[in-house]
Image (cartoon, grey):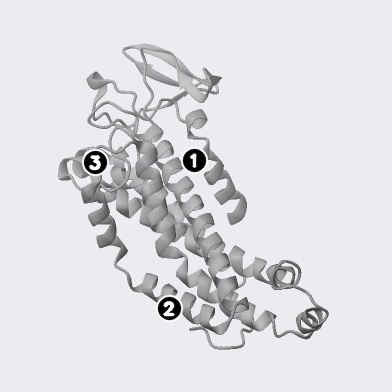
Amino acid sequence: MIRPLMLCAAVILLCAPFFAPYSEDEQNRSRAQENPTHIHIRGARPVIIEGGQTYPIRFFTNGHFFGISTPARIFLFGSDEYGRDVFSRFLFGGRVSVAGGIVATLLALTLGLSIGAAAGLGFRWLDELLMRTTELFLSLPWLYLLLALRAILPLQLSTTAAFWLVTAVIALSGWPRPARLIRGMVLSAKERPYVQVARSLGASPSYLFRHHILPQLRGLLWAQALLILPQFVLADMALSFLGLGAGEPSASWGGMLAALRHFSVLESHIGHWAPALLMVCFFLGMQLLNRRQPSPTSVKISGTIQ
């Protein structure tokens, strides 16, 4: 049950332009800081009543999943200080955070697989060099390095540049642990009898890795992906919360959480709590999905992981 729900949530977030009734930066200053719109049912049809007029909610209209005729506006979670729809910004911000987490996960696992495999299959001096480099990356204070990097960059970064900056830093900080696990499994796998037989018959290290070792790493890679993906999404949110991600008018989950620091928002606009509660549900679902996967430590690893 958890897996289909998380898949649906990911599809909705990644297809935000379709499911959101408005764009992330569409403003209506006369409708700023409004509470969530009340939806009524008239004749089994959802409608809203505004200015004494009844406006039906239409589905699959104007390239969106739902919408409403002007001059009425529908704010499922209310509107912010600029009159922007909080629900739409939640979907667009989730698309950025989830897409950034997925890209960072792919980059981190690709880098970790390459370095871990090279360390496990290479000469001892190469193994020592790569493992010492891994320890160096584990010891670096990535948050402070990112703050310093952001300080020397232009104040106004494009959304694309900010996205790739944050994604690259998260990926660089996340590859060492998968690399160490992969290196340990490679050391174990290459001592298996059938791998030794293939090597004695003249198989190259690349052949051994592709045909005999890589299939044994698929379960570990999948488990690591599910483990680090929510961590990377949280890291993206934390950086956006600190103002290091995409700035206004682009939406981000971290930026939306930053708005909750204002007491007036917490007290008077209950709709702004909805995105935070949905974020909690999303990460709880990711954790429940992780618990259903086999632990990578259940695979016997021989040798010492440096």
Can residue 288 be spotted in the picture? no
In terms of sequence position, does the residue under pointer 3 or pointer 2 come before the other?
A: 2
Q: Residue furthest right?
A: 201
Q: Amino acid at mark 2?
A: Arg
82 and 269: which one is in front?
Answer: 82
> Which residue corresponds to the image point at 55% horizontal and 60% vertical from the top-left?
110
Horizontal side of 153 relative to 174 (left or right) equals left
Q: Amino acid at mark 3?
A: Pro
Q: Residue furthest bottom?
A: 303
In terms of sequence position, does the residue under pointer 2 or pointer 1 come before the other?
A: 1
Which disc, if any, is residue 132?
Answer: 2
In terms of sequence position, does the residue under pointer 1 or pointer 3 come before the other?
A: 1
Q: Position of residue 246 (x, y in %)?
A: 32, 41
Q: Residues within 10 Å of mark 1 (few under 14, many from 20)?
A: many
Q: Position of residue 22 (x, y in %)?
A: 41, 25
Q: Position of residue 27 (x, y in %)?
A: 30, 23
> Which residue corresponds to the image point at 58% horizontal and 48% vertical from the top-left?
7
Q: Can you identify the residue that label 1 sits on?
A: 13
206 and 70: which one is in front?
Answer: 206
Q: Position of residue 150 (x, y in %)?
A: 25, 50
Of the residues tagged 1 and 3, which is closer to the observer? Answer: 3
Q: Is 114 located above or below residue 269 in the figure? A: below
Can residue 243 be spotted in the picture? yes
Of the residues tagged 2 and 1, which is closer to the observer? Answer: 2
Q: Amino acid at mark 1?
A: Leu
User: Label 1's element?
Assistant: helix
User: Label 3's element?
Assistant: loop
> Which residue corresponds to the image point at 45% horizontal and 56% vertical from the top-left?
283
Marks 1/3: CA–CA distance:
30 Å
